[in-house]
Amino acid sequence: MRAIGNLLSEMFRLHHRDLVRFATRLVGDRDDGEEIAQDAYMSIAGRGAQAGAIEHPKAYLFTAARNAAVDFTVRRKIEWSYRVEVEGIESLASENDPLAAFEQRQQLARLIVALNELPPACRRAFVLNKIEGRSHQEIARQLGISVSMVEKHIMRALRQARDLRRDDGSF
Amino acid sequence: MSRDHPERLPPSTEVSDEALRWVMRLHSGSATAADHRCFESWRTLSGEHEAAAREAEALWVDAGNLHLDPVTGIVKPGRRGKGPTRRKVLTGAVALATLGGGVWASGAFRNHRSADYATGLGETRTVALPDGSRATLNARSGIALAFSPSERRIHLVEGQVFFEVAPDGIRPFRVEVNDIRATALGTSFDVDSNLADGAVSISVTEHAVDVASLSDRRRSEPVRVFESQAVVIDAEGRIGAIAAQSPSVTAAWRSGMYIAENRTLGDVVAALRSYHPGWLVIRGEGTAKLLVNAVLNLRTPDDSLDALASGLPIMVRRISPYLVVISS
């Protein structure tokens, strides 16, 4: 078992660059990515001695970053207020039930982080289908890939979204 | 969901993957009516299948609440404006995807009709029809238009819709559901097929509506329903007695409320189903027939179920996030 300080410095030394790149992909901004990386270290530090026993430090660190990205997305006010303006998730939740509103936000934040973690082509195929209403054939033509590849992309996106939706954030 | 409670575990990955594959296929843009029927029978295979289907549908609906940021290329919360890129063909598929098996079994949609306008779980929407009339769709509802030079015919594919009809001296405005035909006499009215046991109710908030049932042999003439009145047509097509119903009760769901005045628990739960991501099951002799007087929030169906449990001799058990059993 290693001391938590050693573990963190080792994680930082070996994985920091990849971690920031990963976190940036999840939230779209390099500064925010740095912030999320810090949050990930903090959450591991917060686990104290428990953290020293982990077997796969890199996977552990990246899971912590993914959770931090979900929390970050839930917290980020600007985008959610945009959301309210347009209509939607916020209006689904009762205004006097902040817990339900928070849970709905959390659910959507997980979905967003799950999709952002996907390779760009996969995410693009999903968004073209779900958000822009394109058929699989149209997407295949637009992206220059086969229909079965489009389906592989969309299934991957759905599975990833499902898995993170079920994940309660503990690890 | 906690990992400490195995009885609350979600459907297995294998079954869930199948459900996701179904949802993907039904939104491919080339799904057939047969595909929809297959999915409807697939989901009845077990409680786990139904739960997986619900989870996949909820996931699909949630994903409508995001957009791709053109600058960063990543997904962010919130919808873009409803641009013309959003195609009707796929939203129609949503409505068909959520159709109950019983509707298919009735043969009402053997002609492969799909919805022109549809809403998903917990979503309501008002649409302007080509003649200037307006239709407000409750959650999980769909309509198909069949306008011609001689009439404005609308099929209620599923759910509940409130119509505000624009006057047109030549083309009557008709809403059809099952074998029931409601003809507007310059008016606004509500058609609800979300009742227990396959019944349909028609409630009038302005002027009058003529209600005819092709399968009601006892009546050859349509029944005229006036403002502040409602009528229920049962699954066999029998038109019930006309009852008073205040327009504010009829309109409540459009504000996210459900007002139960001597309604059966079966009807109340049927109304909540369009807002609850899980499968609501009523068990036990007479449970569905319990009479309810309550004002419920449709946007928080779980709280509403708890409110019902506190005032009625019933128990609400959450077997999983996707399966709720209501029993005496």
Image (cartoon, rainbow, N blue to C red):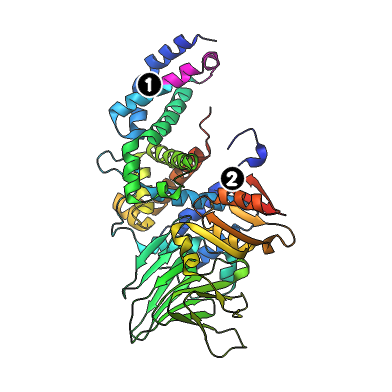
> Which stretch is magenta?
A41-56
Residues marked 2 and 1 touching at CB (< 8 Å): no
Q: Is residue A45 magenta?
A: yes
C-alpha distance separating marks 2 and 1: 33 Å
Disc 1 crowd rating (10 Å Cα; few below 14, some 14-19, many 20+) is some
Residue B163 position within the rendered picture, expressed as x and y whole percent measured from the top left:
41, 71
Q: Is residue B200 in view from this perspective?
A: yes
Residue in the image at 48% along x and 64% along y: B96
Instruction: Give whichever of A62, A102 is nearer the camera.
Output: A102
**Which is nearer the eye, B216 or A111?**
B216
Image quadrant in which you'd find residue B45: bottom right
Residue A38's tag is: 1
Amino acid type of the residue that numbered disc 2 sits on in the rendered structure: Pro
Horizontal arrangement in the rendering, residue B243 relative to residue A106 (left or right): right
Q: In this figure, which residue is indicated by the disc labeled 2?
A: B321
Residue A84 on the magenta span:
no
Q: Residue furthest right?
A: B285
Q: Main secondary structure of the magenta part?
A: helix
The quadrant in which residue B232 appears is bottom right
